[in-house]
Image (cartoon, rainbow, N blue to C red):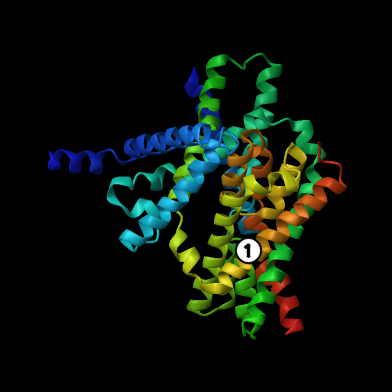
Amino acid sequence: MIEIAHKVIADQSLVLAFAAVGALMWISAMLSRLLFAGRIHASAIAIMAALALAWYGGIITGGKKGLADVPAFAGLLLMGGAMLRDFAIVATAFEVDPIEARKAGLLGAFALLLGTVVPFAVGAGIAWSFGYRDAVSLATLGAGAVTYIVGPVTGAALGASSPVMALSIATGVLKAVLVMATTPMAARFMGLNNPRSAMIFGGLAGTVSGVAGGLAATDEKLVPYGALTATFHTGLGCLLAPSVLFLILKAIV
Amino acid sequence: MAIYGTALLALCTLIGVALGEALGMALHVKANVGGVGIAMMLLIAARLWLARTGRLTPGLKLGVEFWALMYIPIVVAMAAQQNVLAALEGGPMAVLTGVVVVAICFGLVAVLSRATGAHHD
């Protein structure tokens, strides 16, 4: 019996992940209907539950990949990895209205620029208030507040210390998690109910994972518009943070 | 045939990601610059062309739309593999930065989407 279970776990990891995520979505749909009378979107509950499970997985395994470090759920790594995530995000563009997307183009670009400069400044400012004084550490911590990829890329380019890099990544991951978890609650406040505001949101909130998760839990139809701008976020951050933004910071410090 | 749709999606993704890498290299950035966005625009253009020339068959659409529908389960799987523990253990500075940045960005989204008339009631 146990032997069969081990063999299935080892050979069928992706299929197991499909079944596990399906089960989680089904439970979430039930909870949404019975407990919240449909007021909280089933996908929002599923994403929150998945984050909680990722936290639990980290506790029981001591690993870095959440629930995917538990051998039975290793297939989540492929299913939720960057390859299939990007593939599925591109697929959502099939329903995009090109006219709407073009109208918001310039606004999206402006939001992108703000979404890079503002988190960088806030991150560096808070790091300053916590006692960091050298431009390299400040830039690395500021870059981490843009996305969790911009942080380490900037740190590596500038030669930041390892604890600062780790802290910078933690900030970025936390930002992504917060965006995923709180977007549905803040959606009304942000006016997040049409393609244009979704493109502004994608540019400002950054991190493809945070925007993708947050919009999926708010309104599926908005996902492609948010992704269209969010996808430039990490690239723009990696471009500006170690160069222009670092130089400005160095001039101030 | 559904596989034509999935293959079209794959082709757009591959070209987009490759162009994103090339753009990153040209800008001396260690990241993919807008690869997914370029791929999305290619797919939008492909769809317009297919519809105009009458080649947008139900089978082809199914091959793309299946993946669009799988998007939310994939995001759930993505959420389940985040290093949530490390994010919360990053200490008060990481938590404070994360919360303040998200709050300010959400506020700016509210301002921009209302100021530009993107908000519908």
Residue B28, placed above or below residue A130: above
Q: Which residue is found at the position 62% from the left and 62% from the top?
A: B29
Q: Which residue is found at the position 36% from the left and 40% from the top?
A: A17
Question: Is residue A231 shown to the viewer in this render?
Answer: no
Nearer the observer, A187 or A197: A187
In the displayed structure image, the side of residue A201 where residue B113 appears, left or right = right
Nearer the observer, B64 or B84: B84
Rendering quarter of residue A233: bottom right
Q: Position of residue A2 (x, y in %)?
A: 14, 42
In the displayed structure image, the side of residue B101 where residue A56 appears, left or right = left
Q: Which residue is mark 1?
A: B99
User: Tag 1's secondary structure?
Assistant: helix
Q: Position of residue A41 (x, y in %)?
A: 57, 37
Q: Position of residue A229 (x, y in %)?
A: 69, 47
Residue A234, placed above or below residue B3: below
Nearer the observer, A224 or B98: B98
Looking at numbered disc 1 in the image, what kind of residue is underneath it? Val
Image quadrant where one finds the C terminus of chain B: top right
Question: Is residue A31 shown to the viewer in this render?
Answer: yes
Q: Which residue is found at the position 40% from the left and 51% from the top?
A: A53
Q: Position of residue A16 (x, y in %)?
A: 32, 38
Nearer the observer, B19 or A181: A181
